[in-house]
Amino acid sequence: MPRARAAFPLLVALALAPLAGCGDDDGAVRDRDNTLQLRLEEYRIAPQELRVRAGRVHIVARNRGRLTHNVAVESFSDSPETDEVVEFGRTTTAHAGETVSEEVPIRLKPGKYRLVCTIANHDNLGQYGTLFVSGR
């Protein structure tokens, strides 16, 4: 029986591995079909770093929190002088337990983008992520 207990965590890890996606060296989750499967919680978007190919990107976000949340794809700037933020698309608002997606398909060029919740100050409280878009 001790051998069975020792093997249990390994079996659980192997069973959950396909759900985690393939990670890159930088820790970002690579999404092969360009559908971002996101989990929204109080002040967190998971996974926090994703990679997709350029082109049409589809967002599916499930709200696991108690507050309402959404996800927007915005321009990313490393410069504090850049105040202008361009929004490329967003999901509808999700209430607790709901799953939502964007209303209009999002087309993205290669680059770095921010994923943010645009409700109240959720972004300032940590509900954001990074989306890396690579060429085809």
Image (spheres, grey):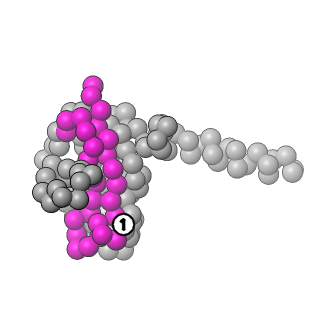
* Residue in the picture at 34% in, 64% down: 127
Instruction: Give residue 8's position: percent from left, percent from top.
Output: 73, 49
Residue under numbered circle 1: 126
Q: Is residue 15 left or right of residue 21?
A: right
Q: Which residues are magenta?
A: 108-136
* Residue in the picture at 16% in, 56% down: 82
Residue type of the residue flagged with mark 1: Gly
Instruction: Give residue 40's position: percent from left, percent from top.
Output: 36, 62
Residue at far top of view: 136
Q: Is residue 13 magenta?
A: no
- Residue 100 visible in the current orientation: no
Q: Residues within 10 Å of mark 1 (few under 14, many from 20)?
A: some
Instruction: Give residue 48's position: percent from left, percent from top.
Output: 40, 53
**Foreground of the two, 127 or 32:** 127
Instruction: Give residue 76's position: percent from left, percent from top.
Output: 24, 50
Residue 80, compared with residue 13, is above or below; it is below
